[in-house]
Image (cartoon, rainbow, N blue to C red):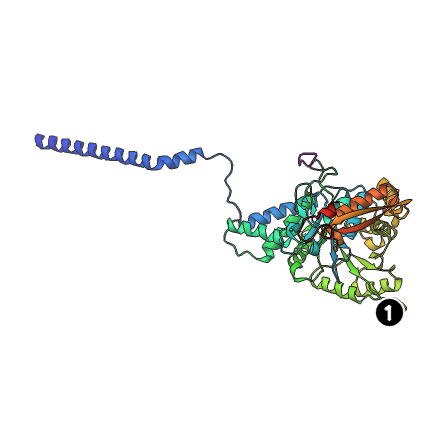
Amino acid sequence: RDLKSRYLLRAASRTHCNLTDMWRQIKCLLLLLFFPIAACIICIPKSPFTIRGGASSTLDELDALVEDAVANNRKIVVVTGGVLSGIGKGVTASSIGVLFRAMGLRVTALKIDPYLNVDAGTMSPFEHGEVFVLDDGGETDLDLGNYERFLSVCLTKDSNLSTGKIYQSVIEKERVGDYLGKTVQVVPHISDAIQAWVLRVAKTPVTHFSTISNQGKQHGKPPEVCIVELGGTLGDIESMPFVEALRELQMRLGYKNMCFVHVSLIPVLGSPPEQKTKPTQHSVKQMMQLGLRPDFLCCRSSISLEEGAKRKLSLFTSVPENAIISLHDVSNIYRVPLMMVEQNLPSMLVQRLRIKPYTKYTSKNTKYSQASPNLVKIEKSKLFKEWTQLAQSVDEPETECTIALVGKYCDQGDAYASVMKALMHSAIATKQRLRIEWIDASDLASDDGDCDDSDEE
């Protein structure tokens, strides 16, 4: 019995040793397997790890931009056009910016072009006019040149948004999986991207000095007002995503933070001349069908808008009669802001957008079309006095100068818009009337490109 018990104890001890060795081997194996994973976990930085992209992250960015715009009381003025293109939206938008500048507000601008080109750099000057190059190298629409000259700011390449540019940004996000497999659609993905772009430009600091001399550094403060021009004619199929985005943006920002200015044509026909309002009526009707309602109606015409035409337009468009602004032909474009002041547009804009501190002592129930002319007295501001002198000096030159301009695209006057403006400003400063003699560059060379000896002599 003793021998048997001893044998059993020895066998149990041997079994325990074998199990212990096996367990040690298993632990070593597990350690070898999980050591790389443990090392990776230990080496991960302590910054929070977030999943990139997704529809929710895009919405979060847009919501944050909206909250920032509302919290900082930032205003957006959208300028649209109807009936036909080239009606003067750029000059109208720039002139409204001058009014805000005269109030002492910081202003920036954004031009929306519905074409599919990413930028204007590859477009023919015969078809599109000048390519205006910004300080940061952005090749943009020539209207940005008007913005910089009127607003006295240096804009960036993001200040020109095209259909090609916004689609490119959305497609690039989709290719890297930022939408996490969602079905990417015009609404809400394209429209949300447009809204986010507008709000980013509206908060980007602008400077009055060239960014080239500052090594590209922005030293300005965030703008208080952003002027957005929607290019083309309202109702064109290519501008539909932008129209929808602007409609949604007004809902997000609120009525008091965003307004619409519609520029339309009032043709003068017949004998005796009669102003026809029907094209503008249909243009505003189409605008309202798209979900936008104009707060101000700027009517382009060869003569001043008659009171009867104003009453008729107010009846059929639901725009208050006082908010219908006559932008008739004048001697120079620098008189457009003066016309707007004469028709009390600055006070109506302030009341419509509830811009402080001008509306501090006015009732919230006061209609913007009934704003008092004394609400904003920008005629006394230094900038407006200088602007008035500029407009008068253009019409009162003392001498005349003639300058020959050699170019390839002489048939398209806008192809050299910046050169013409630079010469014009020089002529204004020296109190001269500028006369440009256009010389086609092809007339100065022979067919084979070589000069004859007789020509050289």
Q: Name the residue under label 1.
A: 270
In which quadrant of the rendered view does residue 237 lie? Answer: bottom right
| x and y percentages locating residue 434 in the rendered image | 84, 47
Q: Quadrant of the C terminus?
A: top right
Question: Which residue reaches farthest bottom?
Answer: 271
In which quadrant of the rendered view does residue 232 lie? Answer: bottom right
Residue 214, magenta (yes or no) = yes
Residue 21, magenta (yes or no) = no
| x and y percentages locating residue 199 in the rendered image | 67, 47
| x and y percentages locating residue 334 in the rendered image | 84, 48
Can residue 77 be spotted in the picture? no
Task: Identify which residue, 301 or 197, lies in the foreground.
Answer: 301
SS assignment for the magenta stretch, majority: loop
Type of amino acid at the residue the image marks with label 1? Gly
Q: What stretch is highlighted in magenta?
A: 212-217
Q: In this view, does 115 lie above or below 199?
A: below
